[in-house]
Amino acid sequence: MTQEQIFAFNESILHFTGTDLLKLKELIDQKIQEEYDKPQNFMHHDKVDDYIYIIDYMDGSYHYDCIGRRSYEEYISNIEAVRIRRKTKSLYPAYETLLEKEVTKA
């Protein structure tokens, strides 16, 4: 948001009561959670969540982690990492590829 948008929003809620503001806070918290849960935002997960993250390397090895942000940092910083996936923590896990690097062979 720009400064003008923030100012306009602030002006628009000046007449809200405490109950209105609490309801607005609930809606904002709900929207934050919806954005947090989207697959493309996994790199913001800094706590253990419902997934196990798997980093695949060029040599066929892999690494498991339970924190999305830490997995993303490993994927970005390690040139050997080629893909990051996640799987659900259930008896029949569902796998999902989150990011994959394009690998060229000489």
Image: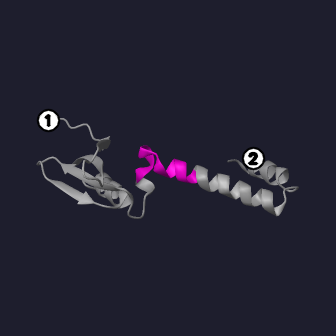
Magenta span covers which residues?
32-42
- Under mark 1, the amino acid is Lys
The answer to whether residue 80 of the structure is visible from this angle is no
Near-viewer residue (64 or 91): 91
Q: Position of residue 62 (x, y in %)?
A: 17, 53
Quadrant, the C terminus: top left
Among numbered discs 1 and 2, the one appearing first in the sequence: 2
The answer to whether residue 59 of the structure is visible from this angle is yes
Q: Is residue 96 magenta?
A: no
Question: Seen from this angle, which residue lies furthest right?
Answer: 15
Residue 82 has which mark? none
Query: Cα distance, mark 1 to mark 2?
Result: 49 Å
Which residue: 29% across, 57% down? Answer: 74
Side of 63 relative to 10 (left or right):
left
Scheme by which the image is coloured: one colour
Which residue: 70% across, 47% down? Answer: 2
Q: Residues within 10 Å of mark 2 (few under 14, many from 20)?
A: few
Side of 89 relative to 16 (left or right):
left
Q: Quadrant of residue 94?
A: top left
Dot in front, 1 or 2: 2
Q: Position of residue 29 (x, y in %)?
A: 61, 56
At mark 2, the secondary structure is: helix
Q: Which residue is tagged 2?
A: 5
Side of 2 relative to 94 (left or right):
right
Residue 105 has which mark? 1
- Under mark 2, the amino acid is Gln
At mark 1, the secondary structure is: loop
